[in-house]
Image (cartoon, rainbow, N blue to C red):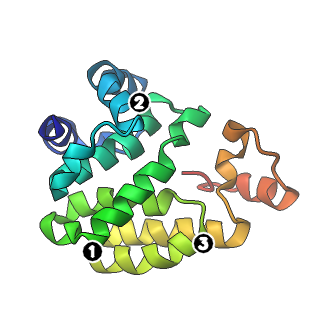
Amino acid sequence: MHTTVLSFWFEEIEPRLWFATDSAFDALIRQRFEGVMKQAAAGELWAWRATAQGRLAEIIVLDQFSRNVYRQTPQAFAQDAMALALAQEAVAAGALQALEERQRNFLLLPYMHSESAAVHAVAEPLFKAHASASSHEFELRHKAIVDRFGRYPHRNAILGRPSMPEEEAFLALPGSGF
């Protein structure tokens, strides 16, 4: 099944959809992969972790599919800690060497999505060494936000967190949210 996830993500859909807001695409992911998403969230896909490709597929399900299917809800971020732990294990197991660059970009995304400055301190050199230049640039932008605020202010409203005045001023700037 992990090959179905990877085929869908890297072959079937257009890369422009990866980071787009598109309700039809979100619905397609829900229709095709909601069951797999629930299995991943329950930790039931451990067999996928036997290979770098399987680890990547599980991370995509937890990190990317959740963001699409549960867009603008707290559930979009509910699997972030699990996705990060899997990405950290994958890096430690040498999975980056077994993947091509565009796959490595997605294996590392849970680091970028973390609201931990300590995680970003590790993420920046990983992105620089193993991801595309544009992914590294996005990591630097994300790291700067976490270093400044200790979190992503654009998630505050979704997660029911009050925004500080400095965060509100930041959020008023173009390009402040991801």
Q: Image quadrant for the N terminus?
A: top left
In-front residue for pair 23/3: 3
When the figure is inspected, residue 69 is found, relative to residue 81, above or below; the finding is above
Quick one: label 1 or label 2, which is nearer the N terminus?
Answer: 2
Foreground mark, 1 or 3? 3
**Label 3 packing within 10 angstroms: few (<14), some (14-19), many (20+):** some
User: What count of labels does the image hold?
Assistant: 3
Residue type beneath disc 2: Asp
Res 130 label = 1
State left or right for residue 133 relative to residue 80: left
Q: Position of residue 34 (x, y in %)?
A: 35, 24
Q: Is residue 132 visible?
A: no
SS category of the residue bearing label 2: loop
Residue tagged by mark 3? 117
- In the image, what residue occupies the spot 63% across and 56% down? 176
When the figure is inspected, residue 53 is found, relative to residue 95, above or below; the finding is above
When the figure is inspected, residue 14 is found, relative to residue 129, above or below; the finding is above
**Residue closest to the far top:** 31
Residue type beneath disc 1: His
Q: Position of residue 112 (x, y in %)?
A: 47, 62
- In the image, what residue occupies the spot 38% across and 28% down? 38
Residue type beneath disc 3: Ala
Q: Quadrant of residue 15?
A: top left
Q: Quadrant of residue 65?
A: top left
Residue tagged by mark 2? 22
